[in-house]
Image (cartoon, rainbow, N blue to C red):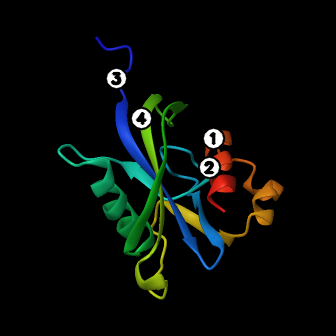
Amino acid sequence: MSNHPNYRIAVEIIIVHDGKILLTKRAEDAQVGPGAWCVPSGKVKYEERPIEALYREALEETNLEVEFIAELDQRTFKGKSTIEDIYRLVFTYLVKPKFDRIDRFAINEEHSEYAWVTKKELSDPKFGTLHPTLMRLLEEAF
């Protein structure tokens, strides 16, 4: 039996627009990270490359088509879901809305709230649940 039965590859998507970055708050009933602030993210499907998952997850979670800017990070992550430990290899991407359009923006049911924030606003205690590595990447993305 594996020591890491819930191991998956995942993507995090840092979306920049007009000098701000999109943060999303996980719904309270979410299995992973309930009530935590993060960025749009999700698991890579079987036979899907992380870069492909980035575009799919951005569309599913924000209804935005995005343009790739850069890959910012690859790291392992251990956390907890509501039922078990989770293990992830996370690819973090920096993107912008395609054609700089956000008129179709909408968060999906995995999230309860969102905020377009400036670098200064990142330090608001409201966003204290952001993972420290993600916080560093967000600050560097500005």
Percent position (x, y) of residue 108?
A: 45, 68
Amino acid residing under circle 3: Pro
Amino acid residing under circle 4: Leu
Residue nearer the viewer, 50 or 106: 50
Question: Which image quadrant is residue 47 in?
Answer: top left
> Which residue carries the number 1 mark?
133
Amino acid residing under circle 2: Leu
Residue nearer the viewer, 6 or 67: 67
Work out whether mark 2 precedes mark 4 in sequence or the reverse, and give the earlier one. Answer: 4
Q: In this view, does 9 lie above or below 2?
A: below
> Which residue carries the number 2 mark?
137
Work out whether mark 1 precedes mark 3 in sequence or the reverse, and give the earlier one. Answer: 3
Work out whether mark 2 precedes mark 3 in sequence or the reverse, and give the earlier one. Answer: 3
Q: Is residue 9 above or below residue 119?
A: above
Which residue occupies the extreme front position in the image? 70
Give neighbour class at mark 4: few <14, some 14-19, many 20+ (Cα, 10 Å). some
Percent position (x, y) of residue 84?
A: 46, 28
Percent position (x, y) of residue 24?
A: 58, 62
Q: Give the residue displayed 37% in from the left and 29% down from the top.
A: 6
